[in-house]
Amino acid sequence: MSSVTSPTPQVSLGRRVKRFMSDQPLVPLIILLIALVIVLQILRPGIVNERWLANTVKFSIPLALLAGSQTMTMLTGGIDLSVSTVATMAAFIMASQAAAHGAPVAVLLALLPALLIGIANGIGAGVFRVHPLIMTLGTSLIGAGCLQVYQRTVIATGTRIPDLFTWLGTGVTWGIPNALALFIPVAALILFIQKRTGFGRLLYALGDNEKAARLSGAHYWQVILALYVFSSLLAGVAGLLYVGLIRAPSSLSLAEPLLLPSVAAAVVGGTSIFGGRGGYTGTIVGALILTVLTTLLTILQMPEGARRVLFGAIILLVTAVYLRITEDR
Amino acid sequence: MTSFIRRQSWVSGLFALLVVLFILTRIIQPGYGSGDFGSLARAALPYAFAVAAQTVVVIAGGIDLSVASLMALTSVIAASMMNSASEEYALFVVPFVLAVGFLVGALNGLLIVVTRVPDIVVTLATLFILQGAALMVLEAPGGAAAEWLKASIVGTVAIPGIPESVTAWIPKALVVLLVCLGLVWIPLKRSALGLSIYAIGSSELAAFRSGVSVARTRIAAYAIGGLFGAMGGLSLTMSTGIGAPIPGPYLLASVAAVVLGGVTLGGGKGGLVGPIVAVFILRLMRTDLTLLAIDPNVTSIVEGTVMVAVVMLGAFLAMRERRP
Amino acid sequence: MAEQIVTTQPVLDATGVAKNYGAVAALRNASLSVLPGEVHALMGANGAGKSTLVKILTGAVRPSAGDILIRGKPLDVRSPAQARRAGLVPVYQEPALIPDLDIVSNLRLTRTPVEPFRNWVRELGVPDLDLDDLARDVPLAILRVLDLARALAVQPDVLLLDEMTAALPANLAERVLDVVRRQAAAGRSVIFISHRFVEISALCDRATVLRDGETVGVVDIEPGVEEKIVELMLGARVDRSRPVSASQVAARQPGEKPRLSVRNLSIGTKLNDVSFDLSNGEVAGVVALEGQGQDELFGALAGSIRPAGGTIEVDGRAVRFGHPADAIQAGIAYVPGDRAEALLMQRSVRENIALPFSARLRNWGPIGSQRERGAVSKAIERLQIDTRAQGEVQRLSGGNQQKVTIARWVAADARTILCFDPTRGIDVGTKQEIYKLLRELAGQGKSILFYTSELEEVRRVCDRAIVIFSGRVVDILPVEIADEAALTRASYGLPRGAAADVGILADAAQKGAGAP
């Protein structure tokens, strides 16, 4: 008896598609991205050039950062709907404090509410086991209320975006967006956490099979608490970058339009909303796809409403198809 | 009999809390009168319908995240249809909008049953889809409402033979609410379908073994939830006179009031009375904070915190029940 | 009487029933024929296919093949409601009353008439029932009686009772058996599933015995039939296994503290006053029929369930586990019977094996310590796990998956491993490897608690067999005498040898003992 038994010899088409998708999730995504760019070029010949490329990357980065929060939380089967509020809060607080206290202090102050909301989310979802969706929605509403109150109290000070963030947000050096100087280290950190740390392993483990993780000695609440704090801080950083890009520091719904796309980018990027599968590389491509798709829809003069319908339908469709593919265990 | 009292003790407690809050309100604002109560009832109307929608679905063991978006959609449909239309046309608009809500709810249920994607994901997706649809109907707040519809929730009910000092405390909005909910809920609760909804929420396996068609019951629960959601959308148009495509804060409020009203998030428990009383408690609390001259934004923070705390408590209790 | 029965048409006649779940056959060729006015026992060891057959008969699952005739007419049961209408009403082990509805509503849900129900409830020995009580608030034993009364109230042609007396106190059980007998006397049929020979010989007319998804015999119940049934359940299997030789059992120093010492452990109604020791270097087998409390025992030792009473000592120190992490800290690892419970199906073999290394807060940092990599690779090598399909554990064969669940704790160097039926549904070759591994681990001084549903494994692997029945340790057999027959008898609560007296069975037991 040979100890090495061959895996199932007969492989159905569905199974083969599934294996291909899970072994090489990036290939179909990149093909889709290229296809979208080609369609864009056909619709508007000449639009695809160096400047467009830099712009697309620039606008993809804040989205990719927020989608990073969604990716991390989705790995455990959760979601973080407070990211847009956290990002907006961070942006507004930073802009309003920078004038008085200077950029470094302002950044620290800006990340404080992100930290608090992350802790609240983590305790709600990890200890009390509120569904993360409801919990993060709740803290998001509270955060928005706090921001309104805060806005009234600091109305006199005025806002200023530190040069660093303007440089990061809008600047382009030798055709390459400066935002990459922030994004590449952050993305590398996320990827490192996901692939090379014990914490990252536990994220996948909890999302794949909470019971198995528990039987191996993992404490659910510890992981979830740390996860939502990280997710929230990441959203805060995204907000700082985004305000440098948009340069509308007094807007109280700055990052709101990014919420739905951030969820969609993670789902399109191959991260399972049920947890246990996916990764940040796919999400980055997903964010690029959504940015290009948005450009395309703008060119097609599709209204905002239709765009939301489309994105919602994409989330549902991708999830349902994913479920079908993985069901034949 | 004792078990009946015990089961109703939560709702009785809520009523007591409501009375205490009323007394508190009178202490804060001695002039708080029937007129203020009327506006409270009017303000509570959309919340109450949102909560009713959530209640049915939660009792069936699910959750509906799309309720606020459905209200926005039905509200803008109603407002845009009634825009510069005749008063009588509204007689057609109302049943049409209710049917839309019912069908959208049924679609939610159908998607959950057919795709086997969890309810929370399906209704999250439909939340976005319905929101987009609402924006496609009306890009900015607008439209109109028939005068008789608007009037139907303003003022009080005059009942011959009862002195006005009493009827002044019976605002039309409250009557509309109770009639609409009662017309659906009371027959439902007495029907086999109502029993089945409680059954699948309480224990899907036991319900299946008792011969309940779980899939059909689930779709029906979401459809009824959709119907209540449409009533909520109509009530928004009725009270504001227009339709707004951006959903209000009704989702979290509905979940919080459901939990506060004694309906466990796991399903199978509770009724409609508790959550409706809970809505009035939450609204009155807001009134009190306003009367105390607290910044309205601070009020929303307090309100949000209370709601989140309530939901956390509910989740905690549900967890304790799962692990005895 | 026998001739008279043969001439009547069976009220329920199922033939050639089969059910496949993917490639796994839960039921191959089962048949069951029930005559009017008969109490018919359905028997079989764990995994023989009883529960699958019950699910098919009651419309909970659809068969892959086979015919079911009711009163000679073919019937296609697609749902429990349809089975009910056809006159086949089951009473399951877990009550089917909706916990959050009161009794009246529960009756209304199944369209059960109230008055007959009330009469049956009284008949069954529950005088003061408030129909407005929530099912949730009714004690489990009473709930089972209510479930039975609800079934009786619709006057079913065939009543299917699954372990009906399991959670009942003696007086209620008596009443239930009495009612079943009268039901048969009134010309109705009962399918009676039970592990208790006492009840079966007192109550049933015939028994159908299942083994490995097939009906292997239908016997008339008469004195001494227990031996025949046990024989049928075991089949023609020859006991090829060699008992573990004494040299394999690690010599125990006198006075050495046992690795694990369980005293008077009890959990709810499931486990009662269980005591035993587990020594270093020992493999102790746990033998029990399904649902006798073994799940709870393993859960308590693994830190998943908090016991209601009793103590657990590790190396002589009393411990209390609040989380599996506590048990792991004490060197006790649990390998659940269901692989889906233990594995991260979408993750790689290495990640699965290395999972315990990252579990603790202090190990959340970067992975890559040589120790971990080495330990994982060594475990893979030692268990000869096929890692070609590394990407996802769900692509491995069942045997390889099972190896991964054990390899995890070999890599983590757990001192005590609780294995819950680790060889269920895997190929023979892998089984042998697992046996060898468990013995090797014991040879290194590890201790292993090994629940198995395949009794022959006891002789291959274990040093002793602890037999549990109805939540109690009923016997502890040294491996020398723990053959399949002895274990089967013990696990049905039958006494070892002929000495003990258990009422109805005393005759049969004496007869059996008289022969040699």
Image (cartoon, coloured by chain):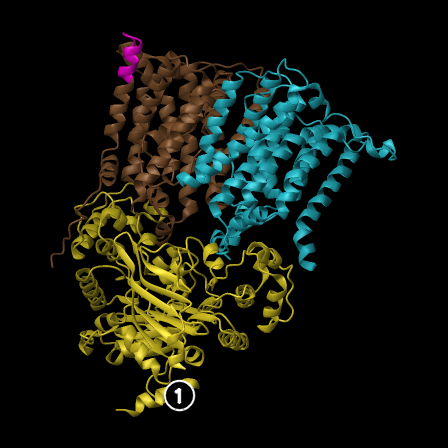
Q: Amino acid at mark 1?
A: Ala
Give the vertical position of C83 relative to A301 (above or below).
below
Q: How many marks?
A: 1
- How crowded is the residue under tag 1: few (<14 C-alpha within 10 Å), some, or many (20+)? some
Q: Secondary structure at mark 1?
A: helix
Subunit ID for the residue under disc 1: C
Percent position (x, y) of residue B216? 49, 44
Residue C216 in view here: yes
Percent position (x, y) of residue A272? 35, 37
Residue A86 in view here: no
Among the chains pictured, the one given yellow colouring is C
Give the drawing colour for chain A: brown
Q: Is residue B211 left or right of residue B232?
A: left
Give the drawing colour for chain B: cyan
Task: Tell me which segment is drawn in magenta.
Answer: A37-47
Query: Is A42 within the magenta?
Result: yes
The picture quadrant where one finds residue C281 is bottom left
Task: Read off the residue under disc 1.
Answer: C506
Pick the residue in front: C354 or A59: A59
The picture quadrant where one finds residue A36 is top left
